[in-house]
Image (spheres, grey):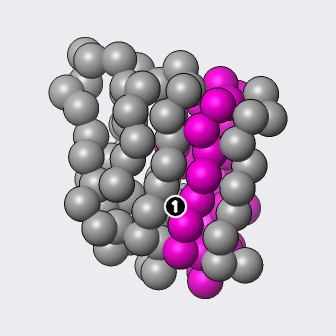
């Protein structure tokens, strides 16, 4: 599995098992109800892009862990900002 598009599914969280998708390169989770991204994404060492717009994220708690996953140009807002933009 290289590209996973689970947009617009009313998801409130991603399962920890997402970390087992070791060949994942692109993750699209826009249009859900996600509050944060799981730290297990750091296990996806080939992950290059996450599209997470249109969620209810206020914080990306594990952003420093996710940065270790070799994402290209990950942008994380300040902790007190509402997070509604693409993560690239």
Visible residue check, residue 22? yes
Asked which quadrant contains residue 86, the reply is: top left
Instruction: Please state, as top left, top right, bottom left or bottom right, where the C terminus lies in the image.
Output: bottom left
* In this view, 82 is above or below 49: above
**In this orientation, which residue lies closer to the viewer: 38 or 49?**
49
Q: Residue at x 65, y 78 (%)?
A: 2
Instruction: Please state, as top left, top right, bottom left or bottom right, where the N terminus lies in the image.
Output: bottom right
| Label 1 packing within 10 angstroms: few (<14), some (14-19), many (20+) | many
Visible residue check, residue 68? no
Q: Residue at x 58, y 59 (%)?
A: 27
* In this view, 79 is above or below 24: above
* In this view, 67 is above or below 58: below
- Residue farthest to the left? 78
Q: Which contiguous range is marked in magenta? A: 12-38
Residue 79 x, y percent position in the rendering: 25, 24
Residue 40 x, y percent position in the rendering: 54, 59
Q: Is residue 19 magenta?
A: yes
Residue 5 x, y percent position in the rendering: 70, 56
The answer to whether 37 appears left or right of 78 in the picture is: right
Asked which quadrant contains residue 26, the reply is: bottom right
Q: Residue at x 44, y 62 (%)?
A: 49
**In this orientation, which residue lies closer to the viewer: 76 or 54?**
54
**In this orientation, which residue lies closer to the viewer: 39 or 51?**
51
Kindly identify which residue carries mark 1: 41
SS for callout 1: helix
Q: Is residue 34 magenta?
A: yes
Q: Main secondary structure of the magenta part?
A: loop
* In this view, 30 is above or below 25: above
Q: Please count the marks in the image.
A: 1
Residue 38 x, y percent position in the rendering: 54, 47
């Amino acid at each position: 599995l290289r590209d996973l598009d689970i947009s617009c599914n009313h998801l409130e969280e991603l399962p920890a098992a997402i970390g087992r998708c070791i060949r994942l390169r692109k993750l699209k989770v826009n249009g859900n109800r996600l509050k944060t991204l799981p730290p297990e994404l750091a296990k996806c060492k080939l992950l290059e892009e996450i599209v997470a717009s249109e969620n209810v994220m206020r914080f990306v708690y594990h952003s420093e862990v996710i940065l270790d996953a070799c994402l290209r140009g990950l942008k994380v807002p300040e902790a007190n900002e509402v997070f509604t933009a693409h993560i690239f």
